[in-house]
Amino acid sequence: MSSCVCVTPKPLMFIGECKGKVLPKRFKIIRNGGGVTAAPRSSETLKFQTLSKQGIALGHLKVEEIVERQSEGNHFLREEGCKRKMKFQASFLEEAYESCRKICAEYAKTFYLGTLLMTKERQRAIWAIYVWCRRTDELVDGPNAMYMNPKVLDRWEERLEDIFEGCPYDLLDAALSHTVSKFPIDMKPFRDMIEGMRMDTKKCRYENFEELYLYCYYVAGTVGLMSVPVMGIAPDSSLSTHTVYSAALHLGIGNQLTNILRDVGEDRFSAMRGRVYLPQDELTQFGLCDEDILRMRVSDEWREFMKEQIKRARFYFKLAEEGASQLDKASRWPVWSSLMLYREILEAIEENDYNNFTKRAYVGRSKKFLALPLAYTKSISPPTLVFN
C-alpha cells in the first residue's frame, strides 16, 4: 500500500504499482493492452527542481535558552538543593567510564575513532553522553522496543532528572551524572531527545523536510548541543557563542541525514512496519513512493532523488565547518575528523551508484586513517579561517 502525497489541485491518477499516486508533469500516459502505465515525456536525462534545504528557525526550538544556560557555567551546581554532591569512588567512576568506552567502541566505530583524539577528560564525557543517547534510542529501536509505551519514556525522563540531581540508577548513569557535574551541560537537549523518541512512536511518515528536520534535531542536533560544553569554544573565536552552537547543531543534522541515507536498505524493514524517514512530498516530486523502497528499485528517479538528498546533507556539513574551526584547539581535530568521515559515507553512496538498498556505504579503515592528516591540517588553522 502506497502513501504517496497528492500535491496538485486536480491530480491525474494512474493504475500501477503506486496506486493513488499523483503523476508528475514530466510523465505522460501510455495506454496499452496491459492497462495504463507512465513514461518520461522524453528520452533525455530527467531534470528535477533543487530541493529546499531550509529547516526550522532555531528560535522555535529555544536553542538560545540552552546556549545561555550552558554559557553561564553549570547552573545546576549553583542551584541550592538541586544537585547532591558527587561522592563516587575513583575506582567506581573508572569502571563506569570504561563501560561507556567499550559500548562506544563496539557500536559507533567511526565516532569512537574521533574520540581517541580528545583529551582523557573530554573522551570520557563524550562516551558517557553517547551511551545515554544510545540507550535512549534503544528504548524505541532496540530488542525490547515491542514493550514500548508512553510510560516507559516518562520513567526514562524521571531517571534523567535523577542523573542531573546526582542520583544515578546504575553504572552507566553514574558516568553521565559525573559528567554533568564537571561540565556546564543543560538538561533540555536530553529532554528534547526523549521527545524525539516520543515522535518515533507516534509518527511514521514525514510529509516534508521541515518535519524531518525537527525529527533530526530531536535525535541528533541535540547531541551537538550536549557536546559543545565538553569541547569548549576557543577564547579567540571570531564567532558568537550562538553561531558556534548552531554549527554544532547543524553537524548533528548532517550526521542524521547521512545515517538515514546510508540505512535505507536496513530501514526497509521499518518501512514494512509503516515507518519511512524520507520526505513524502519529495519522493512524489521525483516520481517515487514507499513501494519503490520496499522493492529496492535503483531507478534513474531514485538516483536523482538521492543526489539531491546528498546535496542537502553536504549543505549542513558545510554549515558545521564554520563552528568546527572555532572550538577549543584540543577539540578541533576529532570534530573535523568526524565531519570528514561522515562526508565519506556520502561519497560511498555515490560510488555504489546510489544503491543504498543492497550495498552498505562503508568507509574502510584505510580511508579513515587517511582522512586524519587532512582533518589535522584543518584543525590547526586559525579560528578566523574557514576552509571551503
Image (cartoon, rainbow, N blue to C red):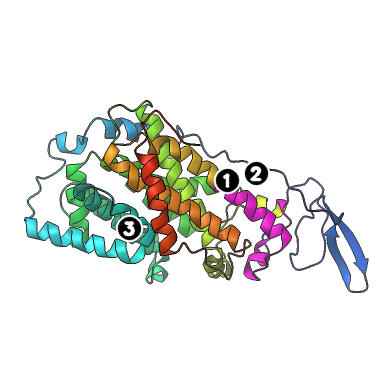
Is 306 on the left-hand or right-hand side of 226?
right
| Nearest-to-viewer mark from 3 and 2 | 3
Mark 3 and mark 2: span between their CA atoms?
Answer: 33 Å
Is residue 356 inside the magenta stretch?
no
Q: Amino acid at mark 2?
A: Leu
Is residue 290 inside the magenta stretch?
yes
Pointers 3 and 1 in contact (CB under 8 A)? no
Which residue matches tag 1? Answer: 312
Q: Residue at x 44, y 49 (%)?
A: 340
Q: Residue at x 67, y 66 (%)?
A: 291
Which residue matches tag 2? Answer: 51
State the SS at label 3. Answer: helix
Q: Amino acid at mark 3?
A: Tyr
Tag 3: Cα neighbours inside 10 Å, few (<14), some, or many (≥20)?
Answer: many
Q: Position of residue 1 (x, y in %)?
A: 67, 67
Which residue matches tag 3? Answer: 112
